[in-house]
């Protein structure tokens, strides 16, 4: 049984604004196995993109990792030197950014931007780089003649496919995708997701998939984690979390999306009464809607506890055999909770 | 290509408008140069001599349309009339004897200031908050806000009079015959140092700040983060991704400045007694030398238009987005 590919342990990220730092991510732990698609869900501002940036060590001032560790195949990412970091980026872990429109340089051709991945990391000549870039474009269904195009000459969907091609260029073991389809319409979204799924199946890389679209996420992911106010509040197998969410926040998030099939249901907004009232709170805004047999979470969000095998929930109180989380929640395939 | 042709058409129209304005302005103003010339020289001229002078300056009694047509025709033949203050030297000769020095001085100062300022700005923005970024801009802005003539005279006094490193006036030593040779070029270069240096000193801060700000805006673009995530070298990201894009506004202002070089650097020319168009323009205004004024204005206009056209051409190379409309 191999160790997980990516291990994030007790990660805390702060944004130092003024003299009171804002904690964007607090004490988050998860692990992604090889070939696993791991989904990270949550509303805007809950810290999911910050985690993505931290995994590739792209956080800039004023953001700071204040504690915790990130290990990639056993190697400490946060401790890498500049040269090691450049080798780690893109060759081993690549990323597709939120804004497809803006992640390509407007004054360089697609070919130049695809090619410099090969010339930088593999010492390829310009000609080799061009040939391989052409192959990459064909892989995502774009004609090789587009290498000479500039980003503004492509549609949004094409641009995002170019970025995906770019991300898979060096066959990285991990692909971080931060809301890869946000700015696209539904039809194009579907095409892009199908493309990603096909690539993932062919090449077997792991994916850290970030979105707030729960139905999309459940369709794609093996396991998912739900984030709320910088903390993971629920983590488990995708189908299980989707069908029977345990945490009240997960429940709200699920019911905030209209289902594509089935009968019409009334949609419910996220009932975070504490924050909606304008109060900043370290506690869980959902303690008001929690069943009364659980203890009070109005002052802090509790740590994850294993609710049942492979299913972790951040709540106190006792329903079922709850066990304190002493280890990193590891992939179900690796036999967590044995 | 269609883009270039369209720009060319635009500049042709702009040029036509400026010729027309140039034709109209003196005719709308009160007073006429011939009568002024008469009083100035104190010479007694026969009425038919006055009439000849009038015709020479294009101030005859022909209908305005006819005057206009012959004016435009003479412009295209390169004839801009005869200077009044330096009668009977043709205007084109007066301008061409000085425009070379003006362009030498202006171009040297502009290129040096723009290149140094842009490189400093890019480096400062890239190492934001570093020594270059925190120390240099205030110093340069401080220097740049001195009254120019004060700075120029200070430099002249220090390096010219006290230290004697550089000559005090003119574009080359009196008595030296202009020729294409190394000693003459060296002579011209030593005369160029102080005037060019003072211009560079006051203008380099602007170039640096402009580039620095554009670069900082560019550095927060997503494609810079993407380039970083791609594991590219820092130097390559700075040059190919950040500076390349941040350069575009600087190219525009470079083109604008390029056109205005021809107008001359008046104060520099006065302080360093440097032969140039700026000084000539001042003199022609004082002497009410309309043909010379018109000639200089027209030259400046043409230079600005040509420089802008060149920038357009360069822009097409630098920014693919302007190629499609």
Image (cartoon, grey):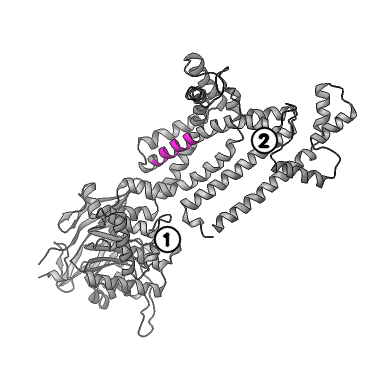
Q: Which residue is mark 2?
A: B296
**Could you say whether the residue bearing mark 1 is in a helix, strand or loop?**
helix
Q: Nearer the viewer, residue A165 or B229?
A: A165
When the figure is inspected, residue B258 is found, relative to residue A63, above or below; the finding is: above
Residue B242 in the image: x percent, y percent?
Answer: 39, 48
Mark closer to the observer (2, 1): 2
When the figure is inspected, residue A136 is found, relative to residue B102, above or below; the finding is: below
When the figure is inspected, residue A273 is found, relative to residue A112, above or below; the finding is: below
Q: Which mark is residue A151?
A: 1
Give the residue at x 50% y 25%. B181
Q: Is residue B117 magenta?
A: yes
Q: What residue span does the magenta drawing correspond to?
A: B111-122
Residue A44 in the image: x percent, y percent?
Answer: 36, 63
**Could you say whether the residue bearing mark 2 is in a helix, strand or loop?**
helix
Residue extending furthest toward the bottom: A263
Q: Quadrant of the C terminus of chain B?
A: bottom right
Chain letter behind tag 1: A
Q: Nearer the viewer, residue B324 or B84?
A: B84
């Amino acid at each position: 049984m191999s160790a997980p590919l990516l291990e994030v342990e007790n990660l805390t990220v702060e944004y130092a604004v003024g003299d009171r730092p804002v904690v964007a991510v607090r004490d988050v732990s998860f692990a992604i196995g090889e070939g696993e698609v791991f989904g990270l869900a949550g509303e805007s501002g809950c810290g999911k993109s910050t985690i993505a940036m931290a995994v590739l060590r792209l956080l800039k001032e004023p953001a700071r990792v204040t504690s915790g560790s990130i290990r990639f195949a056993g190697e400490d990412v946060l401790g890498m030197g500049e040269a090691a970091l450049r080798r780690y980026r893109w060759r081993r872990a690549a990323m597709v950014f939120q804004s497809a429109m803006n992640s390509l340089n407007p004054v360089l051709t697609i070919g130049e931007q695809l090619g410099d991945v090969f010339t930088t990391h593999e010492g390829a000549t310009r000609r080799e780089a061009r040939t391989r870039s052409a192959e990459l474009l064909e892989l995502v269904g774009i004609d090789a003649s587009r290498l000479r195009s500039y980003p503004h000459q492509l549609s949004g969907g094409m641009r995002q496919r170019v970025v995906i091609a770019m991300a898979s260029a060096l066959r990285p073991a991990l692909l971080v995708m931060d809301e890869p389809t946000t700015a696209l319409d539904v039809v194009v979204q579907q095409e892009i997701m199908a493309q990603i799924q096909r690539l993932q199946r062919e090449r077997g890389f792991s994916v850290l998939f970030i979105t707030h679209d729960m139905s999309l996420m459940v369709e794609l992911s093996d396991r998912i984690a739900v984030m709320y106010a910088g903390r993971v509040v629920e983590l488990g197998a995708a189908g299980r979390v989707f069908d029977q969410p345990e945490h009240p926040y997960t429940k709200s998030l699920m019911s905030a999306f209209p289902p594509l099939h089935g009968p019409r249901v009334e949609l419910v907004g996220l009932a975070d009464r504490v924050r909606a009232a304008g109060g900043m709170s370290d506690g869980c805004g959902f303690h008001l809607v929690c069943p009364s047999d659980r203890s009070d979470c109005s002052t802090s969000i509790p740590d994850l506890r294993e609710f049942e095998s492979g299913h972790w929930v951040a709540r106190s109180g006792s329903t079922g055999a709850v066990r304190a989380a002493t280890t990193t929640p590891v992939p179900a395939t690796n036999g967590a909770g044995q | 290509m269609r883009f270039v042709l369209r720009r060319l058409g635009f500049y042709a129209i702009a040029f036509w408008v400026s010729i027309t304005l140039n034709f109209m302005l003196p005719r709308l103003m009160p007073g006429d140069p011939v009568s002024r010339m008469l009083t100035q020289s104190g010479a007694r001229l026969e009425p038919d001599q006055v009439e000849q002078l009038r015709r020479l300056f294009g101030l005859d009694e022909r209908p305005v349309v006819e005057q206009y047509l012959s004016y435009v025709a003479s412009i295209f033949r390169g004839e801009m009339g005869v200077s009044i203050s330096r009668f009977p030297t043709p205007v084109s000769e007066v301008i061409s004897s000085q425009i070379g020095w003006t362009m030498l001085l202006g171009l040297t100062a502009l290129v040096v200031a723009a290149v140094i300022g842009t490189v400093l700005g890019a480096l400062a923005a890239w190492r934001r908050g570093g020594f270059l970024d925190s120390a240099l801009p205030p110093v340069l802005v401080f220097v740049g806000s001195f009254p120019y003539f004060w700075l120029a005279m200070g430099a002249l006094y220090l390096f010219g009079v006290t230290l004697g490193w550089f000559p005090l006036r003119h574009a080359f030593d009196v008595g030296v015959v202009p020729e294409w040779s190394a000693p003459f070029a060296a002579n011209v270069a030593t005369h160029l140092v102080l005037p060019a240096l003072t211009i560079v000193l006051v203008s380099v801060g602007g170039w640096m700040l402009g580039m620095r700000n554009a670069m900082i805006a560019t550095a927060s673009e997503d494609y810079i983060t993407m380039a970083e995530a791609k594991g590219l070298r820092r130097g390559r990201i700075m040059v190919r991704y950040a500076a390349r894009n941040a350069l575009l506004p600087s190219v525009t202002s470079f083109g604008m400045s390029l056109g205005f070089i021809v107008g001359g650097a008046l104060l520099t020319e006065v302080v360093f007694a440097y032969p140039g168009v700026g000084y000539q323009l001042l003199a022609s205004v004082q002497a009410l030398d309309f043909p010379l004024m018109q000639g200089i204005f027209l030259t400046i206009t043409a230079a600005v238009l040509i420089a802008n056209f060149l920038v357009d051409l360069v822009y097409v190379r630098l920014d693919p987005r302007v190629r499609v409309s």
